[in-house]
Image (tube, rainbow, N blue to C red):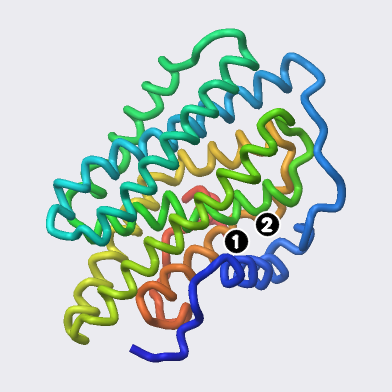
Amino acid sequence: MTTSRPIYNGRFEEDLFNRITHQYAPTIPLERTSPPRGPRTPEEREALADLYVWSTAHDLFIVQLASDAVNRLFQDDPDFQLVLARQIGDDGAHAWATRDRTTALTGRDQIARVEKAIAAHWERVGEIATGSWHGFLAWELHFEHHILPKVLIRRRTTQIADLPFKSFAEERVVPDEEFHRIKITEWWLRRFDAASPSQREEWGAKILAADEALQRNLNPYLRDSWALTERAAHIDVGGHVALYDNFRREILAYHLGVSAAALPALTSLEPEARAQAA
């Protein structure tokens, strides 16, 4: 494997995001220009609560699926078990915190909604993510790496925020999630670089196929999550489809050891009918 591959870290992510944003979503600032305000109306509090239900389900699903993978797919790999153990503990803490904030905003526990959302996650991606380690890695890329554009846009352009949660998000959630992405990538690259060229080619094809299958299944959910975040946080979503698509392409190219241009056409976040019309 070439030694020219850049180190995967937070700086790499920011630089990649900034480069793609400059081309496809130029209204996104390089850094926040003004602080967000708290919710002022019942509708704004309800929207934030809906976003927290989404977050709790997202993180608790990661806990469930990663826990399943420790013994199902990686029973002989203590190196990756440790990565997953850290991810499970962190995302469990994140889910606990957002569940508490949902209760604070609405006055009642929303665990039934969380349970329903997790069941939908399992229906969408469970078989792909648990069927092989290739599918599991593709799922990790989707749930940790590919969603980063929305996370960064939210950090830079959010206008409405749950201010009591802000310090926990900035001091705990943000560094935890960056740690997960880095350690998942480092584990994969060690495995990838030690493989033979034929293994790399075979693994790359399987991971790409799983990533595409996940994208097709996740697309309605992902589009809903962008709309939910726009409604709750009033983020800037200009150019977000091209930004997501091209960021995902670059992340896949990095992990598969090819150039972004060498990858085939990928399923877009754009609704199919609109993409065909374009």
Is mark 1 in CB contact (under 8 Å) with mark 2?
Answer: yes
Mark 1: give few (<14), some (14-19) or many (20+) Cα within 10 Å: some
Q: Residue furthest top?
A: 107
In the foreground, 216 or 84: 84
Q: Residue at x 45, y 59 (%)?
A: 181
- Label 1 amino acid? Ala
Q: Quadrant of the C terminus?
A: bottom right
Mark 2: give few (<14), some (14-19) or many (20+) Cα within 10 Å: some
Q: Quadrant of the N terminus?
A: bottom left
Distance between mark 1 and mark 2 Cα atoms: 6 Å
Percent of width and height locating residue 202: 19, 75
Percent of width and height locating residue 174: 58, 49
Q: Residue at x 72, y 69 (%)?
A: 22
In the foreground, 15 or 77: 77
Query: How many numbered circles does the render carry?
Result: 2
* Residue 66 vertical placement versus 247 (above, below): above
Question: On the picture, is 273 further left or further right than 237?
Answer: left
In the foreground, 95 or 213: 95
Image quadrant of residue 135?
Answer: bottom left
Q: Residue at x 45, y 82 (%)?
A: 259
Q: Residue at x 49, y 43 (%)?
A: 222
* Residue 60 vertical placement versus 263 (above, below): above
Image quadrant of residue 48?
Answer: top right
Q: What secondary structure is marked by label 1?
A: helix
Q: Which residue is mark 2?
A: 239
Q: Which residue is mark 1?
A: 242
* Residue 228 vertical placement versus 135 (above, below): above
Q: What secondary structure is marked by label 2?
A: loop
Percent of width and height locating residue 108: 55, 8
Question: On the picture, is 64 further left or further right than 242?
Answer: left
- Label 2 amino acid? Gly
